[in-house]
Amino acid sequence: MITNSKTGRIATLLMLLSLSLVYCKTSRKATASAPEEKVSAVSYTADILPIMERSCTPCHFPETGKKKLLNTYEATKENIVDIVNRIQLPAEEIKFMPFKSKKTPLSAEEIKLFKDWYNQGMAN
């Protein structure tokens, strides 16, 4: 039986510590085994280019493009950080893209595609 003696207090502390460690270990297992959200592979040609053609023309494509050209895989890849930053800005921000008077903003799903493409290494 545990008493108020020094030995009893130490035993109580050790028991509490043991229970805490067991709890932490089981919590970690539960978290580790939780299913992760699967992210489909994103490619420039299949996923990014159609959005770019719809939302970034005519300003960033040849012929009528008066801004930085983003009509190729290489150009999009080189500028992806700026692209992602600008498509996420609030619509009232001056650097928001696509420019509000020209095209509708990208959907959350489309923005996620750009982020996933970047995070996956920007496959063509």
Image (tube, helix red, strand yellow):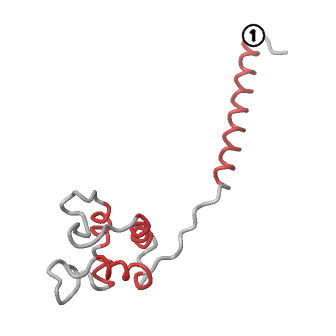
> For residue 87, which quarter of the picture?
bottom left
Where is residue 74? Give x, y as percent: 31, 83
Horizontal side of 3 relative to 45 (left or right) equals right
10 Å crowding of disc 1: few (<14), some (14-19), many (20+): few
State which quarter of the image contains the N terminus.
top right
Q: Residue furthest right?
A: 1
SS category of the residue bearing label 1: loop
The answer to which quarter of the image holds residue 80 is: bottom left
How many numbered tags mark residues here?
Answer: 1
What residue sits 60% from the left and 60% below the top? 36
Q: What residue does disc 1 label?
A: 5
Q: Give the image location of residue 115, x and y in percent.
A: 40, 67
Instruction: Give the camera-side residue of 1 and 6.
Output: 1
**Residue 109 in which image quadrant:** bottom left
Which residue appears at 69% of the width and 37% of the height?
Answer: 21
What amino acid type should be assigned to the residue bearing mark 1?
A: Ser
Q: Is residue 8 above or below residue 21?
A: above
Is 74 on the left-hand or right-hand side of 17? left
Residue at 25% x, 81% y: name it. 57
Q: Quadrant of the C terminus?
A: bottom left
Residue occupying the far left of the picture: 66
**Residue 27 horizontal/vertical position (percent):** 67, 44
Q: Residue at x 30, y 76 (%)?
A: 55
Whether 49 is drawn above or below 7: the answer is below
In the displayed image of the protein, which residue is found farthest to the top?
A: 4
